[in-house]
Image: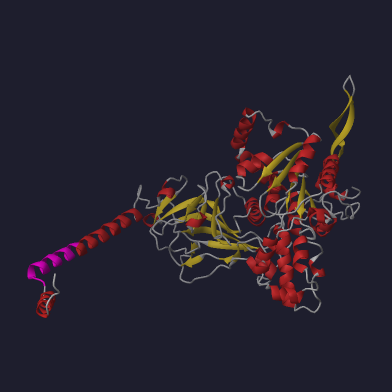
Amino acid sequence: MPPPTTAQIKKDDNLISQPPPPSLLRFLDFVLARHVLAAFILFFVITLAYFVLYTYRDDDTGLDLPWQQLDRITFVHEGLWGSENIEPLTSSWNCSYMAASGVEVDDSAPRNKRSRVCEFRNFCIDRDRGMLSGYIILNGTKKVFPPSVNIMAVDTESDIYWSPRVFLQSSSSYYGYINETVFVYGLYSPYHLSHWLFNGLIPLWSTMQQYGATKDSWLFRPDSWDGHTKPSTFDMSFLSETGRDIVFDPFYMTSAFQIMAPKSNVPICFARGVVGLSDRCVHAYCEESFRRNDISTLRSRFLSHYAADIAQFDRQHASAGNRSSSQHRDPIIALLNRSGSRNIPNLHLLAERLRRAGYTVQDLNLDHGLTLAQAVHLFRNTSILVASHGNALGNAIFMPSSSAVISVNARFSEGDPWFQLPMLQLGQRFYSWECPDSSCVVPDEHLAASCFEWHDLSEKQLRAAVSSHDVLEKFTRLDAPVNSYIDPSAPSQVAQRLRDAWWCYVKDVPRGINVDKFFGMIEKIVKDMGYVEKEINVGDGIEIERLYDEELDVRKGGFSGICRAGKCCGPTCMDGMEKYVFGKGALWGDGMGKGGGPADKSWKLEEGL
């Protein structure tokens, strides 16, 4: 085909440049109008549906569906005020401190500020007006603001101070009223078992016991520290039979026990709100401790709440041909391990050694964690728990009082003291095992490199800070304590980053145990519990059996008696003895304020082995 001529090209250009015919324009306008109309109709329908759902009322309550399904809510309309003995909702408050009653309190003092607990009469919650807060109604002409309250039980850097909003009058003509107490609290790293227990649950439980909680009390969690790293997996429904845990953030809706705060068209008001945890926890940074019966009542609550689950687990074990742990009279030893960081690679050898000696052993891998029901079932009769320093040690809360807990630490970690005071207050014997020789070291170069990177320590800075050219190899092999590597002339900031990287490494590095010494340590603990080996004449010979002798059981004198015998913890925990065991009014004291101390402060389990 010949190429088009110039005349043909010009003719085609003229055709392209001509406007479309009117009929085509009318068609396009029609289609466009239809699309705009369809979009408008769709928007209107969606808006109407949202409006209907948002304002849906069941029995004229206007509550979200989860709230409609709850009992014990009385609905009040402002039109009834002044009649039927219904008065306008008016709030008031009173705050208390750790200072003795009748003593004038310096409200600005940090200690008193942290220990403040405020009780509110008529405390209201909704997720629109509250804005991460509850609120109170004064029904007056002048706003008076309540003090802010620390809702955490942590170190001072992690405190969260909180207070309800104040309104002069209610902006809602309708509200739900619950004649119960709601406890306002916060959680610290709630996905971590030990933080959830020691910085959250135990302080909250102690506060609830002190301020008259009932089986129908409610909870309200307006905030958490590090709460969005990952969700908590711990169900707190054992704290209340009919109440719930009110939250503002769907991220915190981790079980059926949580419920989103109601909408503002029908707020929920409680007869009383208790705000704060009174600066009480199991660590030295809290001024206040809990009472002795707080732990025993909490354990009892665990057992009663999960009784059906425990019975079901026992039936499953029986059907599999296993005996329930409740059938064992001998000490039950739990060995907890995990893959990856903090793994104890030869823990299985200890399990084999213990079984050959006739012990009942629970050999557990915690890579996938445990539910609370499983933990209560597994540890309720456990006598000795062995695990790497870390989260697994928190399971001691479920064990009987005066049991023994052994933390397996990396070499030269100097027995990280984080769990010492918590275990002392739980009434559990606690020991840190640190293998003294290189046979227990499991080097992890990848972990070491990650710790250097995490603490912004370049190889050049590292070389400048240390006194040996092969420090990287020595570091991963844990040949010596970290301070022996640091050059005295090194910049202080770089030296500190090296120390921080060291603690990062020894915290998570796998660590082995000396099986012979560890077995001897457990044998010593078992004898202290009254289990001794005796020769038994069985007719055709003599057999060695482990029998219980109450006279040899150090537990019969109570936890303070164990400590007076120098057998409740290693020598590094002596600082907490005066406050929690031997001092006047101490948690585990005899109430006489006799003072004193253990028989031998240098005693330790591995001595003489």
Please identify the residue farthest to the left as the structure is shown. 22
Please identify the residue farthest to the front as the structure is shown. 2
Instruction: Answer whether residue 134 is visible to the viewer in this image.
Output: yes
The image shows residue 379 at horizontal and vertical percentages of 69, 41
- Residue 531 appears left or right of 345: right
Q: Quadrant of the N terminus?
A: bottom left
396, 594: nearer the viewer: 396
- Residue 402 appears left or right of 194: right
The main secondary structure of the magenta stretch is: helix
Residue found at x 40% / y 52%: 64
Segment colored magenta:
20-34
The image shows residue 110 at horizontal and vertical percentages of 68, 70
| Residue 306 sits in quarter | top right
204, 428: nearer the viewer: 428
359, 40: nearer the viewer: 359
Instruction: Answer whether residue 83 is visible to the viewer in this image.
Output: no
Give the colour scheme shown: secondary structure
Q: Reply yes or no: does residue 24 show up in magenta.
A: yes
The image shows residue 422 at horizontal and vertical percentages of 73, 54
Residue found at x 68% / y 59%: 280
